[in-house]
Image: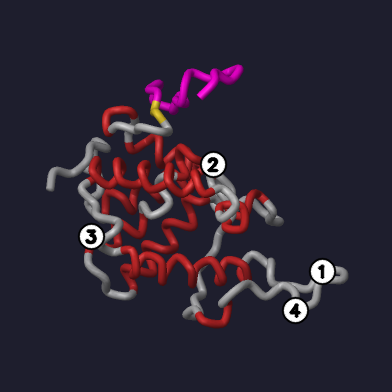
């Protein structure tokens, strides 16, 4: 890849001061706080919302639903971190993601290295995670007022593919501030045994 102005190869600098390689990430190139901090500041739906709603809050609602469903601790932990790659690759709305096939490859690599760092197998629990994630997407559409008719857009036009096929959820969306989202996301991670009180990966 040719050098790009303002870049350092394929790496980006994360909050802890480390550099993570987007093409070939390694476990020692990031800390948990880099994930929690970034997800708390990234807005869902490419920011096309009336209020700021973070990926971090979304992850917490998904994890809470997994807990409510009585799923195992590992599945709940995987659900909390299911969008962890976005801390480094940013959130990419689904219609754009399908237009960027290489993004999916980068996402898979990033998710794999994060899974190894925290002892989580995302692939093993992919079906359970996706069921909650898809249902939460539609719940957020409704909860954030994105299902209302606007000008010339009819209710039928605003329907999303397979919207009626998912379970109906009612998350308590609060639109947390970034500091709130980071604190709560971190609390969930501790509760689910992802990290210990010193924010170190739990040995499994």
The image quarter in which residue 158 lies: bottom right
Return the disc, 4 or 1, that comes first in the chain's sequence.
1
Return the disc, 1 or 3, that comes first in the chain's sequence.
3
> Which range of residues does the magenta coloring cover?
1-19
Other-residue count near label 2 (Cα within 10 Å), few / some / many at <14 / 14–19 / ≥20: many
- Residue 124 in percent (x, y) is at 25, 62
* Residue at numbered disc 4: 155
Q: Is residue 7 above or below residue 125?
A: above
Return the disc, 3 or 2, that comes first in the chain's sequence.
2
Residues at marks 1 and 2, CA–CA distance in whole angstroms: 27 Å
Return the disc, 3 or 4, that comes first in the chain's sequence.
3
* Residue at numbered disc 2: 41
As drawn, the label of residue 74 is 3
Residues at marks 4 and 1, CA–CA distance in whole angstroms: 9 Å
Secondary structure mostly seen in magenta is: loop
The image quarter in which residue 21 lies: top left
Residues at marks 3 and 4, CA–CA distance in whole angstroms: 38 Å
Residues at marks 2 and 4, CA–CA distance in whole angstroms: 31 Å
- Residue 188 in percent (x, y) is at 33, 53
* Residue at numbered disc 1: 150
- How has the structure been colored for display? secondary structure
Residue visible at 54% across and 66% down in the picture:
137
């Amino acid at each position: 890849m040719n050098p790009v102005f303002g870049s350092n190869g394929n790496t980006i600098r994360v909050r802890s001061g480390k550099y993570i390689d987007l093409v070939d990430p390694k476990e020692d190139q990031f800390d948990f706080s880099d994930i929690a901090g970034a997800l708390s500041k990234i807005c869902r739906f490419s920011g096309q919302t009336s209020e700021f709603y973070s990926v971090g809050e979304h992850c917490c609602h998904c994890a809470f639903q997994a807990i409510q469903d009585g799923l195992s601790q590992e599945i709940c932990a995987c659900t909390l971190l299911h969008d962890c790659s976005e801390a480094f690759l940013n959130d990419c709305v689904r219609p754009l993601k399908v237009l960027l096939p290489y993004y999916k490859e980068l996402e898979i690599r990033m998710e794999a290295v994060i899974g190894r760092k925290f002892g989580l197998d995302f692939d093993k629990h992919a079906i359970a995670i996706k069921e909650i994630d898809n249902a939460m997407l539609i719940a957020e559409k409704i909860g954030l007022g994105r299902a209302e008719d606007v000008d010339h857009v009819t209710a039928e036009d605003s329907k999303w593919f397979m919207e009626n096929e998912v379970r109906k959820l009612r998350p308590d969306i609060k639109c947390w501030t970034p500091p709130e989202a980071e604190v709560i996301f971190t609390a969930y991670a501790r509760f689910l045994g992802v990290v210990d009180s010193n924010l170190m990966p739990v040995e499994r």
